[in-house]
Structure formats: C-alpha cells, structure tokens
Image (spheres, grey):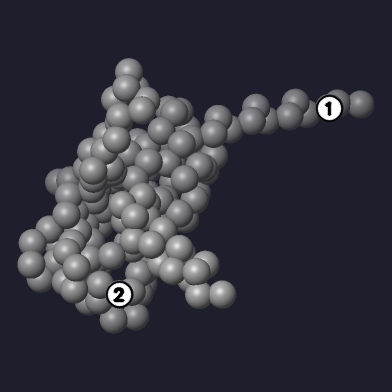
Amino acid sequence: MKTPLIILALLAATPAAAHVVAVQDTAKAGSYTAIAFRVGHACAAGDTTLKIRIELPAGVASARPQVKPGWTYSLERPADPKAAPTAITYAGRLPDEAFDDFAVLMKLPATGDRLVFPIVQTCEKGESRWTEVADPAKPDEKLSRPAPVVTLIPAEAAPAAHHH
C-alpha cells in the first residue's frame, strides 16, 4: 500500500498546491467575513518565510488581523488614521516544511464581483510576489504567481416587512 502515499506525495509537490490561496474563496457582499490566506511553502525549497504582506483591495471598509502566537503584525493606513488599512504585514518564521493561515476579519464591499488580494511573501533568500491577476479574456491562461481572489456573492434583497 505504499503506492498511494507516493502518489499523494507527488501530487502535493505539484505547482497547483504551491500557491498562496484565500481559504473561503467566496463571501457575501457587504458582510463581515474572516478570510484566511494560506501559505503552503517558502519562496524556495528549504527556505523560511519571514513576512507575509497582504494588500487589501479598495472597498474593504475595515480589516482586523487575527493575532498569531509567534508572529507580529503591522497595519498600513492612508493619512486618515480612522480609514481602513490598505495592507497588513505579518512577521515571524514559517519553515518550508510547514504551512499556516493568516486570517483577516473584513467588512467587504456591498457591490462588485471579486476581490483580489496581492500578497508578497518575503523569505530568508528572496521573495515571491503572488500578484498576478487573470485576464477575463483568457480564462485558460496559467499564472505562475496568482494573487488570491475572493468571489463576492450578491447579498440577498432584504425581505419586505409584512403589515397586518
């Protein structure tokens, strides 16, 4: 029964499993939603991830990073300190053989079809920029470093109040 384990090991090493992805890649427009950005490997084999910088798309009204033991975070904001952050950077150590989720609680925009979260992964030996965005005109195009995408589901119309 060793064959299935070997096949699983080979599948785990494929590039498809090697992207930074949004865990929960759909969310209701206008909702408060926690989305985790899963980092599955370092920038290069044997390397250690030191930072994950998550850019927040326009329209995200608020964003709160989840506290992670062993990691610190910093928020980038525009000049107005009450404005929503434009980026969150986590700093710590993630060995290549491990994975982790970096969660952010966000107030999502009420309209739109998808949110793109460019991520820069900084390692001891370089960085990986997960910032490529698919061209809607080329649905079969393969990207080497795609940015995580969350598809917005339109909020249902509020039910009308019934008066008796």
Q: Is residue 102 visible?
A: no
Residue pictured at 78% horizontal, 29% vertical: 161
Query: Is 103 positioned to the left or the right of 91 in the image?
Result: right
Secondary structure state at the residue bearing disc 1: loop
Mark 2 is surrounded, within 10 Å at the Cα level, by few (under 14), some (14 to 19) or many (20 or more) other residues, namely few
Residue pictured at 32% horizontal, 22% vertical: 138
The three-letter code of the residue at mark 1 reads: His
Residue pictured at 38% horizontal, 62% vertical: 10
Query: Is 14 positioned to the left or the right of 111 in the image?
Result: left
Front in this rendered view, residue 25 or 85: 25
Q: Position of residue 26 (x, y in %)?
A: 50, 42
Q: Which residue is mark 2?
A: 97
The three-letter code of the residue at mark 2 reads: Glu
Q: Is residue 39 visible?
A: yes
Q: Which residue is mark 1?
A: 162
Nearer to us: label 2 or label 1: 2
Q: How far is disc 2 from disc 1 in space, using C-alphas? A: 57 Å
Q: Position of residue 65 (x, y in %)?
A: 35, 62
